[in-house]
Amino acid sequence: MGNAAARARPPLVAALRDAAVAAGVTAVLAVPFLGFRLEDSAQGLSLGYRFMWVVYAALAVFAGRLLLSLAAHRVAPALVASFHRRTAGVHLPARFGNKVGWAMVGIAALLPWLPFADRSLMSVATLVLIYIMLGWGLNIVVGLAGLLDLGYVAFYAIGAYSFALLSLHFGLSFWICLPLAGILAAFMGLLLGFPVLRLRGDYLAIVTLGFGEIIRVILVNWQEVTNGPNGISNIPRPTLFGLHFEGPFKTPAPEGTGFADFLGIAFSPMQPIIFLYYVIFLLVLLTTLFAQRIRRLPTGRAWEALREDEIACRSLGINPVTVKLSAFAIGAFFAGLAGCFFATRQGTISPESFSFIESATILALVVLGGMGSQIGIVLAAVLLIGLPESQWLRDLAEYRMLVFGGVMVLIMLWRPQGLLSHRSPTVALEDGAGKPAP
C-alpha cells in the first residue's frame, strides 16, 4: 500500500530533474535568439551580448516546468476526481427538461420582437437554428442508434444542391423542393447504409468520412451540373402563399406580389430576415417533435437497443439491417431539409460550404451537448456557433478553432458524457418502488 502510494506520487527529485532538463534545453535554444544582438553605433554595427536574458528564460522555464509537474501529478487529479464526484449522474429530470425546452421555444418564438433584436442578432439566431437542426438529425444516428457518422455534411450538401438545381432548371418553388431535398438526402442515406451494415466503431467512421469527401469531390469536379468550385448563385428565396419578401436591392417582385405591398405597409429590411427565421424555427420544431415522438415508437426503441447491445438486439429478433438503414435515412432526411434552407438563405452555395470541418462541427455539437440530449445540443449550438458569431466576440474570430479545440479537450477530460447527457433508454424495467431495476 505504501509502495503504491509512493509510486503514485512522483518524488520531488524527479520533478526537479525534469525541470532542469527543460531549462537546459531552453538555454541552448535561447542562446542564438536571445544571447546575441546587433548594436548600431557611430563605428558601425557591432555584436553585443545579453546572456542574462538566456538565464532569465531558463529560470522561467525551470519554475514553470516544476510547477506544472507538481500540479499535474498532485493538484489536477484531485480536482478532476472532485469534479467527477460532484457531477456523477447529474442530468436534467424529464419534467424539468420539458419545462426548460418549452421555455426555450417561447424565447425563440418571441426573439424577433424583443427590443434588442436587430439584423445581426437575427442572422446569428438563424444560423444557430440551422446547426440545431443538423445536430438533432445527427443525434438520431450517433446519439440514439450509436452509429458514428463523420460524413453527415454530405447529406447537407445534397439537400442544398437539390434545391438549387431543381429551382433554377425546373422552376420549382422552395416549398415543393423542401420535401424533395429531404427525400433525395434520405435516399443517399440508404445507399450509404447498405455497404456499412457490417461495420461499426472506427471502421464505420472511416467509411462515412470517405463518403463525405466523395460527395465534395463530385461537387467540385462535375462542373456541367454543379458549376464546380464556383458553385451556384441566384438561388430563389421562399415565398409566403405566393408573396415575395425581396427587398429594393434584390430582383423586384412582380406587381402586387410583394408582402409589404399586399398588406399596404412600408417595406423593412427586417421582413425577409424575420420570415427566414420563422421558416427555420418551424423546421426545427418539426424536427424535435418528430425526434421526441419516434423515441417512444418501436423504431426509436430499436435504435436505443442497437446502441446498447447489438448482439442482444439480434437475440430479441430485431433486424439490425432495418434499424441501421432507418437511422441513416431519417438522419439524412433532416440534413437534406437543413441544406435546402441553407441554400435559399444564402442565395449562393459552393463546395467550400460543405467541407469536413462542417461534419466535425456538427458532431462536436452532439458530443458536447451529450449524445441523446436535445437540450444539450441546443446549449452546445449556442456556445459553439452563436457566441463566436456575436458582435462582442467577432474580433476574436481567428482564435475560434483554438478555443473550439480547447473546449473539446476540457469537456472530454471533465465531462466525457457531454453537458447534459441522457443516454438512459426510453423504456426500462422498474422494481416494486417504481425505480429503474438494477
Image (cartoon, rainbow, N blue to C red):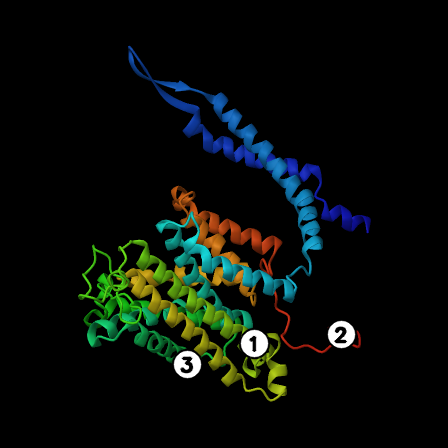
Q: Position of residue 364 (x, y in %)?
A: 49, 60
Picture quadrant of residue 9 = top right
The residue beneath circle 1 is 295
Q: Which callout, 2 or 3, points to the residue nearer the camera?
A: 2
Closer to us: 78 or 3: 78
Q: Amino acid at mark 1?
A: Arg
Q: Position of residue 234 (x, y in %)?
A: 21, 63
Picture quadrant of residue 36 = top left
Residue furthest bottom as drawn: 317
> Marks 3/1: CA distance?
20 Å
The residue beneath circle 3 is 190
Q: Could you tell me if residue 360 is visible in this image?
A: no
Q: Residue at x 22, y 63 (%)?
A: 233
Earlier sequence position, callout 2 versus callout 1: 1
**Could you tell me if the residues under marks 2 and 3 are in contact, i.e. CB atoms within 8 Å?**
no
Closer to us: 146 or 287: 287
Q: Secondary structure at mark 1?
A: helix
Q: Position of residue 49 (x, y in %)?
A: 42, 19
Closer to us: 400 or 215: 400
> Marks 2/3: CA distance?
40 Å
Pointer 2: residues within 10 angstroms few (<14), some, or many (20+)? few
Picture quadrant of residue 187 = bottom left
Q: Secondary structure at mark 3?
A: helix
The residue beneath circle 2 is 434
Indicate the quadrant containing the C terminus: top left, top right, bottom left or bottom right.
bottom right
> Marks 2/1: CA distance?
21 Å
Closer to us: 167 or 247: 247
